[in-house]
Amino acid sequence: MDRRELRYRNGLLLVDEAGGLTEFAEEMEMSLSQASQILGKNPVRGIGNDLAPRMEEKFKKPVGWLDQIHHEIDSASISGAKRVTVIGVLERGGKEDDWEMREDKGKASIIDFRTEDSGCYALRIRGDGLQPRIRSGECIVVEPSIKPQPGDHVLVVLKTGRRAIKELRQVLGDEFRFGPICGSGEPITIFSEDIEAIHRISSISIPLPTTKG
């Protein structure tokens, strides 16, 4: 489940708490049409980072409440979803673009995600180096079989073993140009001969705990 869907489901809890969508709209001082666009049966937009804290404040919820799981998730209700395993943790090493992959020694986790990629996997991010785009504890869902396009966020694996999370900016022959996914860092160019793999990051998701084994 990605952040947009999680916020939608939690938003429905607030609608129930308010007594219905009309009452929710009144509490939020928005029109019923605006409320329907984010929390109706067929929402056309998600709950953005400007609206989310307003909703939490109006309903006296702690900061970040909309991004936490407060209900049981039935994966069968997510059409086309498969259970993607969180296979490890990515933690920033000594350099800005150097992320080390470690075993996740906490509880095993899964993510319900719509994909046809049998090799799809997820990695938990540890640390604040990618905020506000990716928060510590959130997971990136990676689909190796989908060819990344300029503008995609990617996991770059170098032949040295180093890893970097970047935005793919441009491909020119055997040169790949990458930029930061947040902040104002300088773009970098890496040659294909130095790259082991470039995997597309398809989602940023909240993991669901489960038991190992």
Image (cartoon, rainbow, N blue to C red):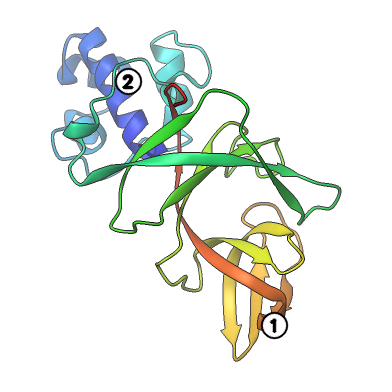
137 vs 182, nearest the viewer: 137
On screen, 90 above or below 152?
above
Which image quarter: residue 118? bottom left
Q: Residue furthest right?
A: 94
Instruction: Tell me: residue 31, above or below residue 78.
Output: above
* Residue type highlighted by circle 2: Met
Q: Residue pushed farthest bottom?
A: 173
Per the image, the residue denoted by label 2 is 28
Q: Is residue 196 above or below residue 172?
A: above
Residue 156 in picture, x, y percent from top left: 63, 64
Q: Is residue 29 visible?
A: no
Left or right: where does residue 83 sit relative to residue 107? left
Residue matched to label 1: 193
Contact between marks 1 and 2 (CB within 8 A): the answer is: no
**For residue 105, what is the image quadrant?**
top right
Q: Residues within 10 Å of mark 1 (few under 14, many from 20)?
A: few
List x then y, in percent, for residue 142. 47, 54
What is the secondary structure assignment of the residue under circle 1?
Answer: helix
Look at 16% across and 15% down and name the residue there.
20
Is residue 125 shown to the viewer in this render?
yes
